[in-house]
Image (cartoon, rainbow, N blue to C red):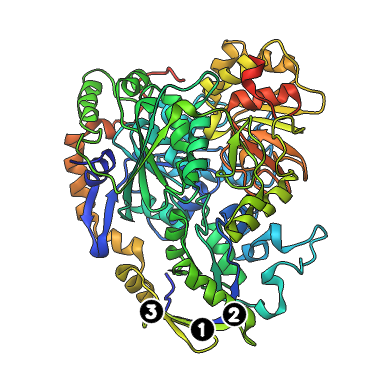
């Protein structure tokens, strides 16, 4: 996993509730594209007009927010499907950090697995930051995971909370699969105990043919 | 003092890791075609083997064609997914339910149907509707591609324990009200983000009176409440459902399992972090009007008026949803002309759902302006439905009777609603573009979808009798 320490860059306000993963990346793009190609389809339904030209009304198409690395949104961002492609599409678009009032549970885990930092702030705070971005000559912010701070265009600093374990993992760029593989003895011990306690779990051949 | 969720969670903790993260043992890992083959390849590329192939099962559903003469190469863009998963499964010793065999179907339909999913299990799959299996009392949830690799390589997952929520549904359902109406009304009442961070247990007399199929429908939509886990305590209904399923334990082993399952329900004095109580006897057939499952009303209600909404953001969202759906505030939703009807999916593609739709359709004709499909949730469901003659009922009414898969719920295989067209669908998501670019989706029960197909409009199934 890639490290996340600090990001300084353009931040874009898209403060709506319930931005779902179908909006972030439509299901039809889940087939026939590599992970690193998905950025072109992020927010596809909003981003393009019928002739595939850029929709000038979509906030992320505005010149001042081009190349944004930080996205601000509302409640329940990333609700819906478990597709990790939603995170890959956002990363492909250029985002490294999302600041929102809340995030979908499965999306939260997927973002972490791709070193994308999710910051939860009360909605009023997200809205204040968004309002500041909209009037700033340069809508740029710094998000620093070491100091757990967001520096707004005005220089004002907003602290944020983040799970301590998750923070360590992102700062170090941990390999979770590798770490769990080192627990193999624990896993084997659990399964051996469990095989006597719940033998039916491990009987995985069909015992009859009836279905439905 | 423990909840069903806490009992299942704690009995699967392999190790407590730092920061409140648990390493959880996984009893069943279900793979589908979108990430199945690729995940197996990624594991192999890292020089790793599948930790417990005997606990892993794979099935193609998302990208498969549903035309009656379909085969693995019917969808040229995605046929490689099927071949990769089949070859990867065979190489690793994973059971693969191939097209044309009784085991094939939507992963969340076949799990319960085959008896693979059982009470007290941890079940994961790379699909958010994995919460469905909670209807049997399993702790089941959707995971992403990297977590799939983690489970393949270690048969465990690192997870932070969610808090708990109980939703008590009490009362006898009114005639013509389905499990789908109950869960849609619940989402409408408490909101699409209400369950976030929680493991939800559905309880109460309404739930106790439900069949397993109905409970699976309720738990299926947990994720549309924001909860990745939804569970229902097992009871005699659950045990008799499982008794003779192919992969369920048999004879003494079944008795042993049953004794274990009896200890799973939440203790009487168990405490939940959040509780909701809903009078289910007041629920009427539901239909969604917007682009989130929480945008739902009873079929005899009027389309809500954003100008009456005090919160400006909510008002804007409602206006955007109504514009996308091309609906007028204040008008009756009943009578809205439609173009498509879809009966199927992991929400409502089980045999009982198909029977429910067939009862409405029997002896009637699909309206001339409507295209209507039934896509059974599994090959086995399809075969039994055909033995019961249900296919004939649908075909003679003018429905298409297709092969099992996710089909028009997600549109990944090319089964989509054309831009601007309106569908009444027994699926789970009415998101913008979900059933195809600019497609307008109204979520409803199988009976309501069938009634809409006959009327050519959004209709109250109770009036058709």
| On screen, residue B33 above or below A49 | above
Q: Residue at x 52, y 73 (%)?
A: A96
Q: Residue at x 64, y 16 (%)?
A: B360
Residue B220 visible in the shown view: yes
Quadrant position of the C terminus of chain B in the picture: top right
Residue that mark 1 sits on: A152
Residue that mark 2 sits on: A133
Q: Which comes sooner in the sequence, label 2 or label 3?
A: 2
Q: Quadrant of residue B112?
A: top left
Residue contact at pointers 1 and 2, CB within 8 angstroms:
yes
| Chain ID at mark 1 | A
Residue that mark 3 sits on: A148
Query: In front: mark 3 or mark 1?
Result: 1
CA distance for labels 1 and 2: 8 Å
Q: Please rate how many residues cluster around mark 1, counting C-alpha atoms within 10 Å: few if below 14, some from 14 to 19, many from 20.
A: many
- Apparent side of residue B255 relative to residue B372 in the rendered image (left or right): left
| Chain ID at mark 3 | A
Pick whichever, B460 or B264, lies toward us. B460
Residue lying farthest to the bottom in this orientation: A155
Same subunit, tags 3 and 1: yes
């Amino acid at each position: 996993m890639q490290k996340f320490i600090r990001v300084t860059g353009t931040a874009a306000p898209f403060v709506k509730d319930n931005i779902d993963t179908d909006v972030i990346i439509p299901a039809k793009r889940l087939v026939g594209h590599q992970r690193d190609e998905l950025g072109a389809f992020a927010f596809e339904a909003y981003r393009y007009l019928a002739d595939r030209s850029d929709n000038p009304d979509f906030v992320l198409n505005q010149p001042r927010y081009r190349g944004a690395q930080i996205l601000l949104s509302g409640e329940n961002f990333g609700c819906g499907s478990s597709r990790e492609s939603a995170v890959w599409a956002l990363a492909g678009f250029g985002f490294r950090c999302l600041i929102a009032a809340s995030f979908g549970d499965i999306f939260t885990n997927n973002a972490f697995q791709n070193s994308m930092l999710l910051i939860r702030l009360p909605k009023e705070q997200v809205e204040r930051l968004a309002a500041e971005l909209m009037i700033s000559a340069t809508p740029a912010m710094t998000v620093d995971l070491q100091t757990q701070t967001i520096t707004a265009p005005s220089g004002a600093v907003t602290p944020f909370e983040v799970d301590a374990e998750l923070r360590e993992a992102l700062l170090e760029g941990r390999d979770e699969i590798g770490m769990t593989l080192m627990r193999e003895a624990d896993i084997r011990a659990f399964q051996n105990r469990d095989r006597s306690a719940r033998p039916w779990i491990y009987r995985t051949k069909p015992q009859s043919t009836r279905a439905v | 003092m423990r909840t069903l969720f806490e009992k299942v969670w704690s009995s699967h903790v392999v190790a407590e890791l730092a920061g409140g993260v648990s390493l959880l043992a996984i009893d069943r890992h279900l793979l589908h075609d979108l990430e199945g083959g690729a995940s197996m390849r990624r594991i192999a590329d890292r020089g790793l083997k599948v930790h417990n192939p005997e606990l892993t099962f794979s099935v193609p559903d998302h990208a498969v064609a549903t035309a009656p003469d379909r085969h693995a190469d019917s969808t040229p863009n995605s046929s490689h997914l099927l071949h990769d998963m089949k070859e990867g499964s065979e190489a690793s010793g994973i059971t693969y339910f191939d097209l044309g065999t009784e085991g094939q179907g939507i992963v969340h339909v076949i799990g319960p149907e085959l008896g693979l999913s059982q009470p007290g299990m941890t079940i994961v799959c790379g699909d958010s509707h994995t919460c469905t299996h909670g209807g049997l009392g399993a702790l089941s949830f959707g995971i992403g591609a990297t977590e799939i690799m983690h489970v393949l390589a270690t048969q465990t997952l690192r997870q932070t324990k969610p808090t708990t929520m109980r939703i008590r549904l009490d009362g006898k359902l009114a005639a013509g009200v389905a499990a789908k109406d109950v869960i849609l009304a619940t989402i409408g009442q408490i909101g699409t983000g209400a369950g976030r961070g929680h493991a939800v247990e559905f309880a109460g007399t309404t739930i106790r009176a439900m069949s397993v199929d109905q409970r699976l429908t309720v738990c299926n939509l947990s994720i549309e409440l924001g909860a990745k886990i939804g569970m229902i305590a097992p009871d005699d209904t659950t045990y008799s459902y499982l008794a003779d399923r192919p992969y369920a334990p048999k004879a003494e082993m079944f008795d042993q399992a049953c004794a274990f399952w009896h200890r799973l329900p939440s203790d009487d004095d168990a405490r939940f972090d959040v509780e909701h109580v809903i009078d289910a006897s007041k629920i009427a057939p539901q239909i969604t009007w917007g682009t989130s499952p929480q945008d739902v009303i009873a079929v005899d209600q009027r389309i809500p008026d954003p100008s009456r909404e005090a919160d400006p953001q909510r008002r804007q969202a409602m206006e955007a949803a109504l514009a996308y759906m091309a609906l007028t505030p204040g008008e009756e939703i009943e009578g809205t002309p439609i173009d498509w009807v879809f009966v199927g999916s992991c929400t409502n593609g089980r045999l009982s759902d198909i029977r429910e739709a067939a009862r409405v359709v029997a002896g009637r004709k699909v309206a001339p302006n409507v295209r209507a499909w039934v896509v059974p949730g599994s090959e086995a469901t399809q075969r039994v439905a055909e033995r019961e003659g249900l296919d004939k009922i649908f075909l003679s009414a003018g429905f298409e009777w297709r092969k099992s898969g996710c089909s028009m719920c997600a549109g990944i295989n090319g089964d989509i609603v054309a831009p601007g067209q309106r569908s009444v669908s027994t699926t789970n998501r009415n998101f913008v573009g979900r059933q195809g670019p600019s497609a307008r989706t109204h979520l409803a029960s199988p009976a309501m979808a069938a009634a809409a197909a006959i009327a050519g409009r959004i209709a109250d199934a109770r009036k058709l009798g």
